[in-house]
Image (spheres, rainbow, N blue to C red):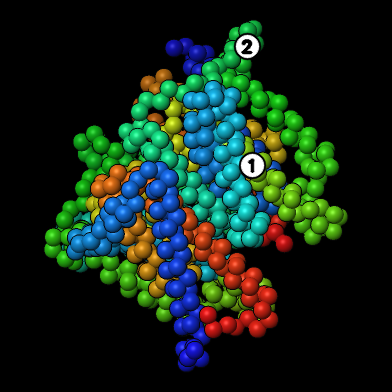
Amino acid sequence: MSSERIPPRVRHWLSHVVTVVLLLVAALGLLSLLLVLTGHPVVPALSALVRGAFGSYYAITSATLVRMVPLALAGLAVAVAFRAGILNIGAEGQLLMGAAAATAVSGVMTGVPSLVAIPALLVVGSLAGGAWAAIAGALRLRFGVLEVISTIMLNFIALYVTGWLVRGPLQEPTRINPQSVSLPTALQLPVLLPGTRLHAGVLLTVIVAAVLWWWLRTTASGFRLRAVGANPLAAASAGRIAVPRTLFGAFALSGVLAGLAGATEYTGITYALYENFSPGYGYTAIAVALLARLHPLGVLATATLFGALQAGANAMQRDAGVPNVVVSVVEAMLILLVVAADRWREHTSQQRVPAESSA
Amino acid sequence: MSALEIGSSFLEATVRTATPLALAALGEAVSERAGVINIGLEGAIIAGALGGTVAAGVLGVGGGFVAGALAGVLVAALFALFTIGFRADQIITGTAITLLSLGLTGTLYRTLYGASGVALSIPTSGALVIPGLSEIPLVGRALFAQPLITYALYVAVPALAWWMQRSHAGLALRALGEYPEAAIAAGVHPRRIQTLAVLFAGAMAGLAGATLVLAQAGTFVEGMSAGRGFIAIAIVVLGRWRPFTVAAAALLFGGANSLQTVFQAMGWTGVPYQLFLAVPYLLTLVVLAGASTRSAAPAALGRRPD
């Protein structure tokens, strides 16, 4: 093979892409099996899945890509944290607090030009998400509290705070529905393509992912974050890296990204805050990040894949009567298959002494 | 209603709400003591709920509880295969298992019973009122007018506490979570013990799910575990990995959930009960931050078993 002409990094990525595609095929195979077992016709169901995700201009823009945005931004949040060795399970709560903060300040934005007001909402939301994650960061660094547990707690607290806000201080003036007042058009993210729901958040997401990729790869602070994640002891002793400061920064950055996801969803899609604002984006984001191997550009791809799966699942329910929750099964199987494939690869490379192979 | 009646029904609701939480948390405490944190507990609970629903229609309430426990064991076995068998990351696997179980139970439920969710006629386990004791003012009904599964906890909590502290196997379990190298050197089989601990936690979580259906709701609802798996993990932490304090922590969370009914009974509609629901989680964070808890946590918690 001419594999020696391909740089190892690219080869590594190609092999991962091939793996993911193979595993996707395997997951869809398992989905088909599940459909057969539950008595659903396989071909109409799968074709509805594909049509719902990619079948039309409207499906691609208003279903798949629109779902990609929060999944990608929250996925980036998870990826940054995991890269630093932080198990942030709290993207869901940070996303909610971002949306809630953006909702809270939208009330005082009347009369402010859109060009200033919309970015301001996004910044406020990001900061709120960052602050929420910083609580977990401070608990870990000051008191040694495992962030796995503290971020789960903070998710619940954020959920109840949101529930209270939409029935209390942020409830719409008629006080009938537990939700905030609808966001004025001037404060909404502009729609990119007329006749669709595709909003400017999708561009923002791509830019954020690209910047994050560049930052992690080329800057000193990005390197410090990766070094601390790879081996905190070595980073501290050999690299003279201030580990606590780097970790705290990673917590905050992760929260900022999740908060941005919430603020973007609020200003781009929902235009209001309500109790079930997030259908678990923060949890699905963990799967998105893992499947992308915590790579920012990979997150864009896997978030699109998951957005497509969710959009397709809704079509599958509508057109073929297959419960849309089946998409969680596919997502979960993808993660488990990737985990199993990784372990298998580690296992086989341990047995062959020269670890490098041209696969 | 008089204040005494309100208090009595509040305590009754507290114990009722706490029962499934305590079941799941006691199991998780055992698993975490062996060094394994199972975020997939939520998945085992919802599997237990569906297993209990399906089996109870055919086999009755007792069969429902057994099937619930078995469904929980099945989910836990998948978790054990990945985390202990393949040595995969516990958090990643647990996340996937929860996702898998929520999706699979939803799909199976809608396939078995239709999308609308017809009114299922599931036999339920009613309150077993103990004469005399249940008439004690305030706490009588809370403690002695509960379903059988709650009474089972009265036995399970001390038994588990004794087993953990006094038995040889309990010592091996705790050693594995604290200092695996030493435990292994002393002849403890880490994989066997951790697998058994994870399966036990699965059975308890499955029982918790069956309790939700068979002793409380009387029906299955998609996603009815409603975060109880994560709450149970909080309870384990707040209860410092010890059976009696875990049970007490479960009561605290149950109480916070039941406060809503008190507010309604008292006519305090303006009180933001959502904030009261958040109190146990805040308290868990505060307790976690307390220095003494750090030493209470198993030192090797979440580490890849080797």
What amino acid is found at the position of numbered circle 2 in the picture? Ile
Q: Position of residue A264 (x, y in %)?
A: 30, 60
Question: Relative to the observer, which residue lies in front, A14 or A307?
Answer: A14
Q: Position of residue A215 (x, y in %)?
A: 43, 78
Q: Residues within 10 Å of mark 1 (few under 14, many from 20)?
A: many
Q: Is residue A311 above or below residue B250?
A: below
Q: Residue at x 31, y 54 (%)?
A: A43
Q: Residue at x 37, y 69 (%)?
A: A301
Q: Is residue B142 above or below residue A314?
A: above
Q: Residue beneath label 2, please?
A: B130
Q: Residue at x 38, y 38 (%)?
A: B110
Q: Residue beneath label 1, please?
A: B201
Q: Is residue B273 visible?
A: yes
Q: Is residue B35 above or below residue A349?
A: above
Left or right: B169 as drawn, with respect to A100: right
Q: Position of residue A9 (x, y in %)?
A: 49, 83
Q: Secondary structure at mark 2?
A: loop
Q: Quadrant of the N terminus of chain B?
A: top left
What amino acid is found at the position of numbered circle 1 in the picture? Ala
Q: Secondary structure at mark 1?
A: helix
Q: Are marks 1 and 2 on the same chain?
A: yes
Q: Residue at x 65, y 44 (%)?
A: B199
Could you give the CA–CA distance between mark 1 and mark 2, rounded to whole angstroms? 30 Å
Q: Is residue A219 visible?
A: no
Question: Relative to the observer, which residue lies in front, A225 or B89?
Answer: B89
**Label number found at residue B88:** none
Left or right: B225 as drawn, with respect to A348: left
Q: Quadrant of the C terminus of chain B?
A: bottom right
**Which badge, 1 or 2, comes first in the chain's sequence?**
2
Question: Relative to the observer, which residue lies in front, A83 or B172?
Answer: B172
